[in-house]
Amino acid sequence: MDFFQPILGNALTFAFEKATIEGKITITALVIVSMVSWSVIITKGRQLLKARSSTKKFLDAYRATKDPMGLYREKKEFVGSPAYEVYAAGCEELTYHLENNPVEVKGQKRISLESFQSVQVALERGVSAEALSLEKGMIVLTTAVSGGPFIGLLGTVWGVMETFSGIAKAASASLTAMAPGVAGALIATVVGLVVAIPAMFAYNMMITAIRGLTQELDNFNSEITTDFEHKYVDNRALADEIADALRNLENEKSQPAVA
């Protein structure tokens, strides 16, 4: 540690001091990109960790209840869980149809297949919204990965061009004359790689986590759709619906009129 630190420190300091104005502007731009990418890495990392832990808690609680809408009616919340947000969106739409478009089946409130299509749309819309939320900000990391080295290379090429131009004007091609300029040019590429490498590793790890959460959302959407359909959707055959309607009509006729 004591051996490498002076070498690296002296080399970087020397190269930065010998960099041209264009090179220093390039390095400043790369530092800004690095700061933005690290802020995204930290923020997105916290979001994904929270999403994973909250989703696990929510799914455990949901699968422990017999009523698919039990958690919603108990007003339990799981902040940071994408699956819970999808669940809440579906429950809101289902509650609306149960209150405004109910179908009586053996004394229980249910909804028609037509109304259930609106619930499915709400669930799918919730999945899409949460997937977009998980992917938000990842463009910054891809920009840092792909753009950082090229920005650094631009600064290096510019610095080398300046160095060779100065040597040509001075008519001196000694190593002593070339070395400072080349070192000042190369630092831009070094900084570009320092920006890109952490962003690359973070992007690969995060995109894998996002794909896993998105797949989990799709699976949960199928699960909750099936649960809602079994519990709250009128799946009677047409003949049964007609028979029940006729039976209800006969009961209404048989009731004595109230004066």
Image (spheres, rainbow, N blue to C red):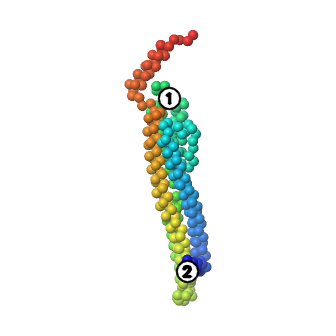
Residue in the picture at 52% in, 59% down: 139
Callout 1 amino acid: Lys
- Residue 72 visible in image: yes
The one of 142 and 40 positioned closer to us in this rendering: 40
**From this viewpoint, which residue is outermost toward the top?**
259
Label 1: state its secondary structure: strand
* Placement of the N terminus among the 4 image quadrants: bottom right
Tell me: 240 left or right of 59: left
- Based on the displayed image, in which of its 4 quarters is residue 163 positioned? bottom right
Instruction: Answer with mark 2 or mark 1, whichever residue precedes in sequence.
Output: 2
Coordinates of residue 206 in the picture (x, y in percent):
50, 58
Residue in the picture at 54% in, 34% down: 96
Residue 169 has which mark? none
Callout 2 amino acid: Phe
How many tags in the picture?
Answer: 2
Residue in the picture at 60% in, 72% down: 25
Neighbourhood count class around disc 2 (C-alpha, 10 Å): few under 14, some 14–19, many 20 upward: few
Q: Which residue is under mark 1?
A: 109
Q: Nearer the viewer, mark 2 or mark 1?
A: 2
Coordinates of residue 127 in the picture (x, y in percent):
49, 46
From this view, report whether residue 112 is shown above or below residue 50.
Answer: above
From this view, report whether residue 114 is shown above or below residue 160.
Answer: above
Q: Which residue is under mark 2?
A: 3
Q: Are marks 2 and 1 in contact (CB under 8 Å)?
A: no
* Placement of the C terminus among the 4 image quadrants: top right
- Based on the displayed image, in which of its 4 quarters is residue 158 positioned? bottom right
Tell me: 43 left or right of 215: right
Label 2: state its secondary structure: loop
Coordinates of residue 61 in the picture (x, y in percent):
51, 43
